Amino acid sequence: MSIPKPLVFLQKEVLPAILNSYSIIFFLDNKVLASTIMLVSFFNFWAGFSGLVSVLIALTIGYSMHLDKQTLRSGLFTFNALLVGIGMGTFFDPGLVFFSLLALASLLTILLSVSFSSWFGKYKLPFLSVPFVITFWFIVLPSSHFENLGLTQRSIYWINEVYAVGGNNLLDFFQTVDNFKVNSLIDIYLKSIGSILFQSNVLAGLLISLALLYSSRILFSLSVIGFLSAYFFAQFTGSEAASINYYNIGANYMMVAFAIGGYFIIPSKQSYLWTVLLIPLTSLVLLFFYKLLSYIQLPVFSLPFSFVTILFLYFLQMRTQVKSLIITPLQQNSPEKNLYTFSNNKDRLSGLYYIPLHLPLMGEWTVTQAHNGEITHKGDWGQAFDFMITDHEGKTYKNNGIALSDFLCYNKPVFAAADGYVESIIDSVEDNVIGKVNTVSNWGNSIVIRHASGLYTQLSHLKKGSFKVTKGDFVNKGDMLALCGNSGRSPEPHVHFQVQIYPIIGSRTITYPFAYYFKQLADDKQQLVQFEIPKLGDKISNVSIDKFQFNAFNLLPDSSFTFKYTLNNSVEKNLSWDIYTDAYNQKYVHCSQTNSVAYFVNDGYMFYFTAFYGDKSSILYYFFLSAYKIFLGETTKNRLDDSLALSMLASSKFYTWINDFIAPFYNFIRVSFHSNIIESEMSLNKGTIKYSSEIELKYLKKSKIISRSELTINETGITAFEYTNDKIKMKATCINL
């Protein structure tokens, strides 16, 4: 029996939108926190009820007017309406006029939220709680003109309110908790965090702080840091209005700490430091608005928090260099996820920010002059390479090295490092006699290729008359360009290679990595290097694509997989995955049964997953961990290593919580991924290849393998994979190949 569409809509859209409207107040997407905030809001029943009604009204308007469903589901357009509803329910008595004004206020709030979202969004800035403040002013300022709208006495006689809701039992419980002897500083902290929801009692603050601790250790620590900074500054200045205990004003300091310390900025020691510095500034701004608005009897509420946060974020965007205080590039509504994902992807996904450049050489070559070399690579021309071929003794020539033909790299072909257009060529300089240089035609015979606007590569000291291309030609990566020579300022044959932003031969150089190459190790093994700068003395060679592996992992949009699988020896089941491309042309695997998504990249040399969203007990998640990174180059049994964000693990342990607290300063837990080929039976592009992989957790000086996987491919594609950990044993076989 199918579920009616209205119920499906309620389950998948409305309920998540309601919960997220609560949790996003604290910049999080967490059901436990959302449920706790909702519960606490009902400590003042009419405030909680009004807040919920206001959210429902705003959502009804949003869905009926066909606003973006994903944004509505996130709570971004409705959390201000929630604050307005709770605020009105706190300050005014319920009645027909009250609910009429509540409906109008909800309408105004979502209008302001949507409008400010577009306006502030142009500058990549959040609108925060500005719609709530403005809307509440529209209610408070003319409220005296509404004779049938009365200020409530419930906040004064809150004991009567508690008794009306829960009788003597609830009243006794509240009084016991509220009268519990705690340190005065803790008492003020709990009341301050509760004041974010207009609650000024210990129980509200205790429940919210515990839910915050469960949801985000980073935000919990920031709440303490923000509170202490504000408290001691208030004590230092002796300002009552800036006091952390002043009704609903103490919340400003904590919210600034949340926003700057861990949400809009990647958590770090710098973000924590700036949090401490911005709290006194928030106090100054708060005092100014408090004095200014008191003349027209308007409350300050969260205006100082919004003002300082927006101002500081705009200030950060004006920097010409960004070395610290990194604005969160991909918001995951969790400081821990933001931090771990950013730290992990900063190096791991650096290749996504580059047009891949490959070595313009065939076979093994030695870096005889690297960046900032001792001979010619100086100043503006310091980011360049000289390549030569050396033998097992390190010599660059055979015989006595007098003739050009004695040199191992002479007459060897050079190739295009990437696709592009031939911008310019010099082909008129004779090769030098060994030991002599031509300083008049310094670069010798050279070629410049334009790969993109502002990205050019130059190869120099080539052999006259050896060019296979002409100016204006389009070349593909790996196309032969010319032969290695000894022209220009070149005492012996070698290839000079540099990357530059201008098309002129001899332009200043820039630092730019090679995408993939092998580095020869001392024990005759090869190390795969990814998006790095070779060093002096490195013996390096290009990576070639293995078509068999490339085709197996070439997951095309609009294709699908059907698997049969068993989980912990359960009854065999079937599931299907579909491959899609999003609006940014990023490919992903989607499992409709669990509504899980895994983004991936296949750049021809490497297949790797970039992100996972959804159910971490799904078969797709186990595949994500099994095929996290697969090298598609020539078959090798060398181990491939990678890193995994700690937040990607399915479960949290006690030690991961400890790491969360100190991660902005030092991350003592590392999660690594290792894979290699353990079996290869190939013949005429047919056969099977089996990969083995494992996830390793390292903390302090200990390490532990927490999962193992095996994945099998053949000429038709991915055929099977297995995943095991201490609780799960899963086997899956593809049945639609």
Image: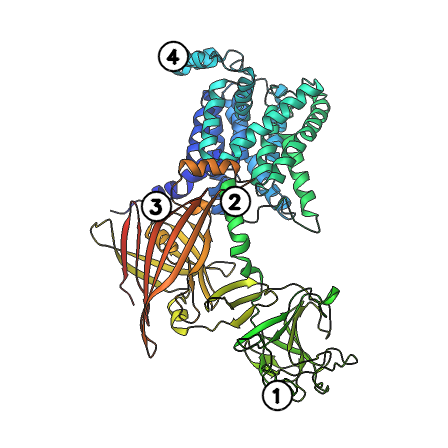
The mark nearer the N terminus, 3 or 1, is 3
Query: Marks 2 and 4: which is nearer the front?
Result: 2
Mark 3 or 4, which is nearer the eye?
Answer: 4
Q: What residue type is labelled 2?
A: Asn
Disc 3 or 4, which lies upstream in sequence? 3
Q: Which of marks 2 and 1 is in front?
A: 1
- Tell me the residue at 48%/65% (across/down): 527
In this figure, which residue is indicated by the disc labeled 1?
405
Q: Which amino acid does label 3 sit on?
A: Lys
| Mark closest to the chain's N terminus, 2 or 4 | 4
Residue 334 visible? The answer is no
**Between marks 2 and 1, how big is the CA–CA gap?**
57 Å
Q: How far apart are marks 3 and 1 (CA)?
A: 79 Å
Residue labelled with disc 3: 5
Kindly identify which residue carries mark 2.
338
Q: Which of pointers 2 and 1 lies earlier in the amino acid sequence?
A: 2
Amino acid residing under circle 4 = Gly
Cβ atoms under marks 2 and 4 closer than 8 Å: no
Mark 4 sits on what residue? 167
601 left or right of 370 in image: left
The quadrant holding residue 246 is top right
